[in-house]
Amino acid sequence: MGPPGSGKGTQALKLSERLVIPHIALGDILREEVAGGTEIGKQAEKFMSAGKLVPDELTIDIVRERLKKSDCRDGFILDGFPRNSNQAKNLEKIFLELKVGLDRAVYFSIPLPDVVKRLSERRSCKRCGAVYHLTFHPPKKSAKGGSASGGKDVCDRCGGELYQRHDDEESIIKTRFSVYGDETKPLIKHFEEKGVLLEIDAAGGVEEIYSRLLSSLGISK
Ligand code: AMP
């Protein structure tokens, strides 16, 4: 958990590679549905492009079906779910159904000015979802750096094209922040009461935050 731009997607991806378990990012799944022009994608798009939450009727079933897949047997990292109290309640039910437990809820805490700066230069891979920052974590083949990448930024991991998310535009960022404050932030208390909350200082560079995350989880590099 954490506000938009707190780095949760970047860290979740790194941790999933370290632990060899799937990184399940609901935002990525929804963006794939939109790109594929599916029925779910068509319904989700108007909420996403406005920076609002997609209705629970769509998201909860997606998560349930995804967690049933065999690659989740040895664990998984959920990124961007739950984002409101109804989703949190339903996630508990899904965990009971699937007989799995929640080990940790990681909360990336960061001051607002830092995240605005991060989001404006964020670029994501169209193919694998990897996330870059043009200044702090640039792709090796960067158009900004004037490399031979044909004017396009390219993903280091898979060679996919990088793009700027439509919802990273300033006016939409504002809505996403207020949705986060109203609906998602209250969940931090919920996880704290359950004794699973782990708060990470999410200011600084990717590797610095990753080291903090690993040591808080008691995992070696
Ligand atoms: P993210 O990639 O996590 O920043 O999510 C991008 C957008 O996808 C959000 O602004 C929402 O419109 C939608 N979304 C992602 N996760 C959820 C969720 N748990 N519930 C509802 N909408 C979501």
Image (cartoon, rainbow, N blue to C red):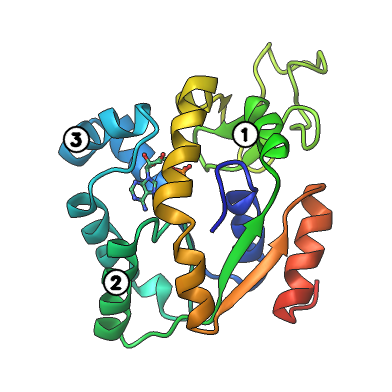
- Outermost residue toward the bottom in this view: 99
Residue drawn at (15%, 37%) of the image? 39
Q: CA distance from mark 1 to mark 2?
A: 39 Å
Give the structural element (helix, strand or loop) at label 2.
helix
Q: For mark 3, what is the residue?
A: 43
Q: For mark 1, what is the residue?
A: 159
In the image, 60 versus 189, the foreground residue is 189
Crowd around label 3: few <14 · some 14–19 · many ≥20 (10 Å): some
Q: In the rendered structure, are the residues bearing label 1 and label 3 in contact, judged by CB atoms less than 8 Å apart?
A: no
Viewer-side label of 1, 2: 2
Q: Position of residue 113 (x, y in %)?
A: 71, 35
Question: Which disc number belongs to residue 89?
Answer: 2
- The amino acid type, in three-letter code, at marker 1 is Gly
Residue drawn at (35%, 57%) of the image? 84
Q: Quadrant of residue 18?
A: bottom right
Viewer-side label of 1, 3: 3
Q: Is mark 3 within 8 Å of ligand 1?
A: no
In the image, 34 versus 90, the foreground residue is 90
Q: Quadrant of residue 219?
A: bottom right
